[in-house]
């Protein structure tokens, strides 16, 4: 891959691969990347700075993290972003937007100088703010004024974002808390590969679980399960583990290797073997 020409390369930004730092109002976005999954440090780390401040305790039940990115590119730069089941609130160039869960990978084009401030909500935690099923904004971006009203800070720091969220802090929602707990369980337990098994262990039906996820998460439980299991595949690749793809597909609950490859490509923008070749 030609890392000397940013217009010809794709960089992956997986937030789990990047460490966190505390944020100050005037903080410089300095951080060291724990693992560059595509070994593209020369292509993008020199031109981007990231910070991931921790939410205040009173908002930590809703917000998973804040994220701040600044960039400076002489030429347009294409960056691959892989999906997680988080809703995001972002502030960039005077615009405030809410981004629903993306069901597949996206390619973002960055050019010139810029910065963005974002809040990533826990999967399942945005429904009380939105006031309607989160599935209604899946694969969509809406103006933040639809959720938080017209009085929005034009270029906020984290403190101003937290003030906005506190002003609109919803009452506790049992359905939201249940959805958050189920997604956390999926993320924490690699043995969860099937929706019917998850529903049985939770003492509910598959249909009820699907309704819960449509209402509060925005994507179905099957998608969430496969997203986290596929993330674990990339971790195994990073560790240099030898992988039998057909056996792995069966272990993850796929009927055949072709379905596994299709899902992997949808999430990561390339086949597993191409992804593995980058390590």
Image: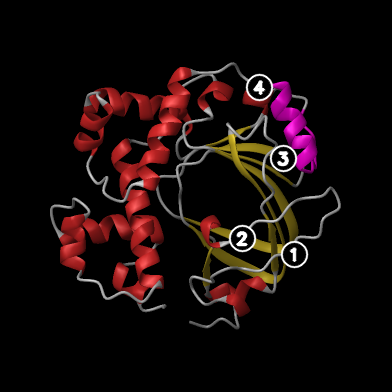
- CA separation in Å, label 1 and label 3: 24 Å
- Displayed quadrant of residue 206: top left
Which residue carries the number 1 mark? Answer: 30
Q: Does the segment drawn in magenta span residue 163? A: yes
Q: Secondary structure at mark 1?
A: loop
The quadrant of the image that shows the C terminus is: bottom left
- CA separation in Å, label 2 and label 3: 27 Å
N-terminal of the two: label 4 or label 2?
2
- CA separation in Å, label 4 and label 3: 21 Å
Color style of the picture: secondary structure
- Displayed quadrant of residue 114: bottom right
Categorize mark 2 by other alpha carbons within 10 Å: few (<14), some (14-19), many (20+): some
Res. 95 mark: 3
**Label 1–label 2 contact, CB within 8 A:** no
- CA separation in Å, label 4 and label 2: 28 Å
Res. 169 mark: 4
The x and y percentages for residue 39 are 52, 77
Q: Secondary structure at mark 4?
A: loop
Q: Which residue is outermost to the left?
A: 255
Depth-wise, is mark 1 or mark 2 nearer the camera?
2
N-terminal of the two: label 1 or label 3?
1
Magenta-tinted stretch: 152-169
Categorize mark 4 by other alpha carbons within 10 Å: few (<14), some (14-19), many (20+): some
The total of numbered circles placed on residues is: 4
N-terminal of the two: label 2 or label 3?
2
**Label 2–label 3 contact, CB within 8 A:** no
Observer able to see residue 217: no
Q: Kindly identify the residue that appears in the image at 59 percent across and 16 percent down.
A: 171
Which residue carries the number 2 mark? Answer: 19
Q: Kindly identify the residue that appears in the image at 50 percent across and 41 percent down.
A: 86
Q: Which residue is outermost to the right?
A: 26
Q: On the rendered structure, is 91 left or right of 39?
A: right
């Amino acid at each position: 891959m030609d890392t000397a020409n940013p217009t010809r390369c794709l960089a992956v930004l997986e937030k789990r691969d990047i460490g966190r730092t505390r944020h100050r109002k005037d903080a410089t976005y300095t951080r060291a990347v724990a693992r560059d999954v595509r070994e593209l440090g020369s292509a993008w780390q020199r031109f981007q700075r990231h910070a991931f401040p921790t939410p205040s305790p009173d908002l930590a039940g809703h917000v998973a993290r804040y994220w701040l990115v600044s960039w400076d590119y002489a030429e347009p730069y294409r960056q691959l972003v892989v999906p997680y089941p988080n809703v995001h609130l972002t502030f960039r160039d005077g615009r405030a937007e809410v981004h629903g869960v993306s069901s597949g990978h996206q390619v973002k084009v960055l050019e010139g100088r810029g910065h963005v401030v974002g809040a990533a909500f826990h999967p399942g935690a945005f429904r009380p703010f939105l006031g309607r099923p989160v599935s209604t904004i899946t694969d969509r971006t809406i103006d933040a004024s639809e959720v938080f009203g017209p009085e929005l800070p034009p270029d906020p720091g984290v403190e101003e974002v937290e003030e906005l969220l506190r002003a609109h802090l919803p009452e506790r929602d049992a359905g939201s808390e249940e959805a958050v707990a189920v997604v956390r369980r999926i993320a924490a337990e690699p043995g969860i590969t099937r929706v019917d098994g998850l529903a049985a262990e939770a003492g509910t039906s598959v249909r009820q679980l699907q309704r819960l996820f449509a209402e509060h998460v925005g994507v179905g439980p099957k998608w969430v399960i496969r997203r986290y299991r596929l993330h674990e595949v990339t971790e195994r690749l990073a560790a240099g583990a030898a992988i039998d793809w057909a056996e792995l597909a069966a272990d993850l609950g796929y009927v055949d290797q072709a379905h596994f490859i299709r899902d992997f490509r949808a999430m990561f923008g390339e086949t597993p073997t191409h992804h593995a070749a980058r390590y």
